[in-house]
Structure formats: structure tokens, C-alpha cells
Amino acid sequence: MTPPHQQPHQQPHQQPHQPCPRRASRRAVLAGLAGAGTLAACSGGQGPAAQPSPATPSPTAPPPTAAPPPSPTRAPVLLDLPAPEPYVPLPGEVEPGCKEAAVDYVTTALTTGSAQLDPESPFLDVAAVLDARLRTAGLDPAHAAGLLGLLPPAGVSAAGVVYPQYGGLSSGRRTASIILVAEQSLLDAAAPDELRRRTLTVDVRLARSGDTWGVTDVLVPEVDFELAVPARPQVQAVLDDDRIALPDPARFDLLQEDVHVRVAELLSAYAEQWPLAVQDVRSGHPFHVYDTDRPSNHTLGRAVDIWSFDGVPVIDQERCPWREAMEFAAAWGVTEVGGPADLGPRPYFSDLVHQDHVHCGFGAAGLT
């Protein structure tokens, strides 16, 4: 029995449990001590009211990194060249259809029209594009391999005819060679504002079936259009004479040591009488006299063909001074003088091939 003076044990009254404040950082503690005295320790009993710790500023965070702007997309390069003027045979041409076929093939192959090129990858499949262009025009692409190297891999081209001259015509007019001079314009994707021009000379071979002429081959001479070598004085005089129109391959030929200097001297002498337009010296002319096995004097570097005197084509025989030009060459010492008419014994001669130009060649006797 429990003694009456004793009561059941009573638990002392306890303060309700207070949660312990979150432990402040060392920096916050030091700041609190400096401002408000001793900070009561966290315990089950009640102590002096804890002073709130000032908010601890978080370290300055770097601003979020902005995503780099996308690389600007380079717009496609649009290149365009106007189509050249169409070729129209002059009155008096011996076989106008033959010349038209040669011109059509070369100018179609070398006139690309416009192109939209990706600056990052501007190169074209030039061979495939050339093949498709010729097939679309109804022309056989099998003969265009030599022209492929004249097309830019990353640009556009346009070619207009200067003059198509006969290099040869077989008896019966079944096959022919056309020495074709064309002016080519070029634009490249790497420099779309820089128009380049050059003149080309190619030997186009053709055959006739019925009344239709078709191209059977295109022979393109190897020419260094950028050749820069010291010229012989007689050659430099020709290159500097604005009365002498020279295709770039003819300029290249004259710079070669194996083209005789007499050819250059004759051109300068001619230019004192008339302005003239040269068709070819060696590049672009058939290697042999056409339909023979004899090397041409052009091949030997001692002949030149001229298709215009005094601004008039030789084929315009009523107005061109071709007769006076032939007589001048013979008097000057040229040993082969071919043209629209045979003016007498050698050095003169004439045939169907030479109705459209005056040929001046030197045999061994004419080079002394």
C-alpha cells in the first residue's frame, strides 16, 4: 500500500520540444556574433531567442552561356551569261550547212546557260551536264571529249563563233574540216563578278549523209593560254599591233621558237596595208594537207591563214581586197599563195577550200 503522503511520481512539466534551427554557415555565425552577442546553443530547454542569421548571399553565378549564333548560310551563287548571237552563214559559202553543223556543235557544247552553285560545294559533274546538253539538242556527245577541258568545273561558259573557215574539203564534198574560231566567256563561282574572255581555235571534222552534215570529231589543240615568255622582236611587234586580230592560240603559236619569224614579218607588212583578221597559224589546223599524207606548212610553223582584210571577210569577194592581198604576198616572197582565184603560175593556187581565206605559206626557198 502506498503511503498517503506519497503521490505517484509526476514527470516534471516539460516545455514542448522546439525544433533546432538549421545550423548556419560559418560566415552567418560570425556575422551574428558581431551583431547580437552570444548565440544560444540548440538544447531541449528554452534559451534566449536566437537572432536570425542574415541571408547568406549565394556566390555570383555566371550568366547562362548563350548558344552561339548559327553560322550564316551562304546564299547559292547564281551565275548567268547571255546566249551568244546565232551564226548566220555569209553569202557565197561553199557548203553553208557544213559550217552551220560545226558551229552548232561547238557553241552548244561550250554554252552552259545559267547555274546555281552551292558555295560550299560548287563543283559540277561537267561531263554529265555536257552529255545531257548535247543529247537534248539532238547532238551526239561521243565527239565532245576534247571540249570537256574547256568548260569550268565551278562556273558557266558561253561561246560565240568568230568565224568558221575551211581546213579541208574532200573531193565530192563528202567530208570536211572546219577550223573554227570562237570567243568564250567564263564566270567562276569563286569570283562571280570577274568575267574572263578568251578565243579558241578547234578543228571540227564532219561527214555528209544525204544533205545533212554531222560532226564526227572535234580536235582541240593543246594551248597554254597563260603562256608568258620573252617574244622575239618581230613577234612582239605583231602582238602589239591593234591592226592584227589574233586568236589566242595564234598568239601562242607565234611565241614558239619553231614558228618561223617570217610569218610574223609578213603579218606586220600586211598590217601596213590593211587591218586583218588571222584565222590560224598552227593550232587548230589539220596536221596534214587535208585528204593527203603530206604535212601542212602550218604544221611546220611556216604558214598563216587570213580570213578578213580591211574589215571585210574574204568570202565577201565583191568587197574584200583579197586579190590585192594575194598579189602583195607573192611580191613579198611568199611561196604558197592560195585564195578565191588562181591568179597565175606558182606561187598562186585556188580550190573550193580557199574561197573563204587567203593562205600564205613558205617553202624552204622562201625562208632564206
Image (cartoon, rainbow, N blue to C red):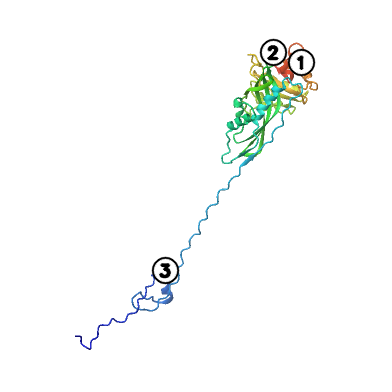
Q: Nearer the viewer, residue 130 or 228?
A: 130
Kindly indicate the quadrant of the structure image that contains residue 227: top right
Q: Nearer the viewer, residue 100 or 57?
A: 100
The reply to whether the C-beta atoms of the residues labelled 1 and 3 are less than 8 Å apart is no
Question: Callout 2: helix, strand or loop?
Answer: helix
Q: Say which label, 1 or 2, has the lower sequence index.
A: 1
Q: Is residue 368 among what the camera can see?
A: no
Question: Callout 1: helix, strand or loop?
Answer: loop
Q: Is residue 96 among what the camera can see?
A: yes
Give the residue type at disc 1: Ala
Query: Looking at the picture, how far across and down is residue 120, in whole percent?
Result: 56, 41
Disc 3: which residue: 27
Disc 1: which residue: 341
Kindly indicate the quadrant of the structure image that contains residue 83: top right
Disc 2: which residue: 365
Most distant residue in the left direction = 1
Q: Say which label, 3 or 2, has the lower sequence index.
A: 3
In this view, 28 is above or below 331:
below
In what quadrant of the picture does the N terminus appear? bottom left
Query: Looking at the picture, how far across and down is residue 257, in whole percent?
Result: 64, 22
Q: Nearer the viewer, residue 141 or 250?
A: 141
